[in-house]
Amino acid sequence: MIKKTLIISAVALFTLTSTVFAAGAAGPGLPGNPVPVTPSSTVTASEAASLQYMREEEKLAHDVYVALGDEWGLRVFDNIARAEQQHSDATAYWLDFYKLDDPAAGNEPGEFTNVELQALYDELVIQGRRSIAEALKVGAAIEEIDIRDLQEAITETANPALTQLYQNLKAGSENHLRAFATNLKTRTGAVYAPQHLSQAEYAQIVGDSIQGNGNGRYGRRP
């Protein structure tokens, strides 16, 4: 897993001064989850690293989709790129709340602080420019990676605000995975084969009815 191989270097981005207290914080609520949650007053180094990593991973999805949308003119890339911008902005929101360094700050489209994410971006754009089918497979693969990493992030945090954030990001990524798989089938006749999730996990996702978080609604900081 990309995230596991990079978590040590990501932790280096965490500074002790970024473990802050949010005294009297009231919980942010989300559509579809009406019970407000109270953010933890501090984040661990591991939670900080995960949030920083997710910031760039969501940016990668956005930037790849913009590049492939420009290449092929498919609406699915434009629509999902807008949602991914919301995803990336949501992670940035909580980075700011906890006074953490933002690894995407100042980076242009297609530029990443994390060298392995930079290499992955370059590789996926090259692949996606080969054909429409390859572009849609790239989109589905990115969403699989996001889902896998978000699942891990959920298990590794006890912070209610981050749990809520990651659950909503995951719901959006599941919608996006369904959209890319459907477009691949209708446009090319090909059936997408999961690359990063098990066949059972993938079947569970594509078999679910569309959820209400595909465009990303992530509450607000208290």
Image: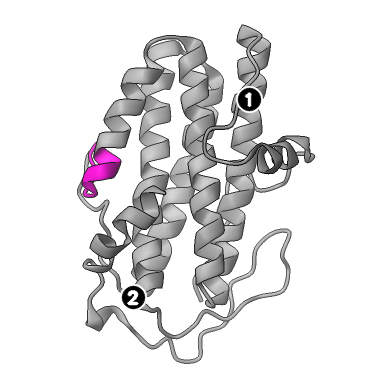
**Dot 2 corresponds to which residue?**
45
Q: State the residue at coordinates (72%, 35%).
A: 206
| SS type, badge 2 | helix
Q: Quadrant of residue 184?
A: top right
Q: Position of residue 196 (x, y in %)?
A: 52, 39
Q: For this view, does 139 lie left or right of residue 178?
A: left
User: Who is closer to the viewer here, 213 or 2?
Assistant: 2
Q: Is residue 115 magenta?
A: yes
Can residue 109 be seen at all in this image of the molecule? no
Using the image as rendered, state which of residue 17 and residue 147 is in the foreground: 147
Vertical placement of 19 versus 203: above or below? below
Position of residue 219 in the picture relative to residue 3 (left or right): right
- The amino acid type of the residue labelled 1 equals Ala
Residue 5, horizontal then vertical, whole percent: 32, 54
Residue drawn at the location 51% of the way across and 76% of the way down: 222
In the picture of the structure, the residue carrying the numbered disc 1 is: 181
The spot of residue 219 in percent (x, y) is 57, 63
Packing grade of label 1 (10 A; few <14, some 14-19, many >=20) is many
Q: Is residue 146 magenta?
A: no
Is 91 drawn above or below residue 193 in the view shown?
Answer: below
Image coordinates of residue 214 in percent, x first then y, are 63, 42
Mark yes or no: residue 151 visible. yes
